[in-house]
């Protein structure tokens, strides 16, 4: 357990240190913050526009972060010989692989937590169809800027990683900003303060989808480099979006279709934007079933990763 904890912690920290993780997260947060500006061009559908756009951004960017983080955590370490150094010590392959997956999934939880906070703030800003809450919007973007400034100061003074310091700065500042935005009243005072907490189940479901994709990307990274991993994850993502149409309707009469329908994650089960647009509450027992569904896929992809990594050659290094 000590080896598992240390490898998982180092994987989590190394993921946060990656500039690409910082760029993907920063781009997602900036895009979600910009979406309320476009609500001035719609009529009484401003919340739906922000919710749909923010959920789609969180899902797609979370998928990208999962593929990039998993590829760096395993395939890059195999290529550079770091995995060989770790496995030469009394560390089993199963422990190494499970710890790597745990570190990647922990980084994805942080990623989705920040994008979920950004989504709540963006919906709060766009609640009034005639006037944006410019104070809350300015406070949000100021928080992103201050987080980057904190990263720069820490990098200059302590020679620490700028991406990691900036992300941790956002992790501390964004919840405080979200609390402050909740207490701010909109310009005219006609719109109530606070957040629309019915978004919370939808945000949790998107987080579960990102975790399932992170487990899949980690399993594939045991054999594939970054580009093939991203391509295959993209193909599985697209097939999962069309799973009901391609496999679900044929599952009763075809064993192959039934197997594919069971093995490929159905990403539509995590997408609740349509239910929110229809003002239908998302039951918490549905979220619980989705969590169990995700845990099964994580376990399945973990077994796949163990199978692919069992006889994987980690001792060959490319000399440049």
Image (cartoon, rainbow, N blue to C red):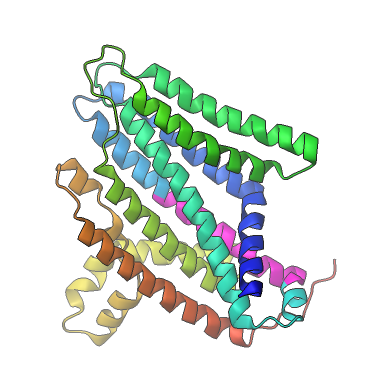
**Vertical side of 145 occupied by 258: above or below:** below
User: From where the camera sits, is residue 105 visible?
Assistant: yes
Foreground: 32 or 293? 293
Magenta segment: 59-82
> Dominant secondary structure of the magenta stretch?
helix
Residue 77 covered by magenta stretch:
yes
Q: Residue furthest front?
A: 2
Q: Residue furthest right?
A: 320
> Residue 114 at what x, y percent from top left?
47, 43
Q: Residue at x 36, y 21 (%)?
A: 184
- Residue 144: image quadrant is top right
Foreground: 242 or 136? 136
Q: Is residue 84 left or right of residue 146?
A: right
**Vertical side of 115 occupied by 267: above or below:** below
Residue 184 covered by magenta stretch:
no
Please state the total of marks drawn on the protein image. 0
Q: Quadrant of the C terminus?
A: bottom right
Q: Residue at x 58, y 81 (%)?
A: 94
Foreground: 233 or 141? 141
Q: Quadrant of the N terminus?
A: bottom right
Q: Residue at x 29, y 30 (%)?
A: 194
> Residue 249 at what x, y percent from top left?
17, 72
């Amino acid at each position: 357990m000590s080896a598992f904890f240390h490898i998982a912690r180092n994987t989590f920290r190394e993921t946060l240190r990656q500039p690409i993780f910082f760029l993907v997260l920063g781009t997602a947060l900036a895009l979600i913050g910009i979406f309320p500006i476009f609500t001035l061009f719609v009529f009484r559908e401003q919340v739906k526009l922000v919710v749909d756009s923010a959920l789609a951004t969180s899902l797609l960017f979370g998928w990208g972060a999962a593929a990039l983080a998993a590829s760096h955590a395993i395939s890059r370490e195999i290529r550079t010989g770091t995995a060989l150094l770790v496995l030469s010590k009394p560390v089993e392959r199963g422990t190494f692989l499970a710890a790597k997956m745990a570190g990647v999934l922990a980084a994805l939880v942080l990623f989705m937590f920040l994008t979920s906070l950004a989504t709540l703030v963006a919906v709060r800003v766009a609640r009034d169809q005639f006037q944006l809450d410019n104070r809350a919007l300015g406070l949000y973007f100021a928080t992103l800027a201050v987080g980057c400034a904190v990263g720069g100061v820490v990098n200059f003074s302590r020679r620490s990683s700028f991406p990691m310091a900036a992300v941790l700065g956002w992790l501390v500042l964004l919840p405080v900003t979200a609390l402050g935005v909740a207490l701010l009243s909109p310009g005219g005072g006609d719109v109530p303060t606070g957040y629309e907490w019915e978004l919370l189940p939808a945000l949790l479901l998107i987080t579960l989808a990102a975790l399932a994709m992170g487990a899949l990307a980690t399993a594939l990274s045991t054999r594939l480099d970054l580009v093939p991993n991203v391509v295959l994850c993209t193909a599985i993502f697209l097939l999962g979006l069309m799973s009901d149409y391609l496999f679900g309707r044929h599952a009763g009469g075809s064993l192959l279709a039934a197997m594919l329908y069971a093995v490929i994650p159905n990403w539509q089960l995590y997408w609740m934007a349509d239910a929110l647009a229809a003002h239908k509450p998302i039951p918490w027992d549905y979220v619980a079933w989705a969590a169990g569904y995700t845990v099964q896929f994580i376990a399945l992809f973990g077994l796949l990763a163990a199978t692919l990594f069992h006889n994987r050659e980690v001792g060959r290094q490319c000399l440049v």
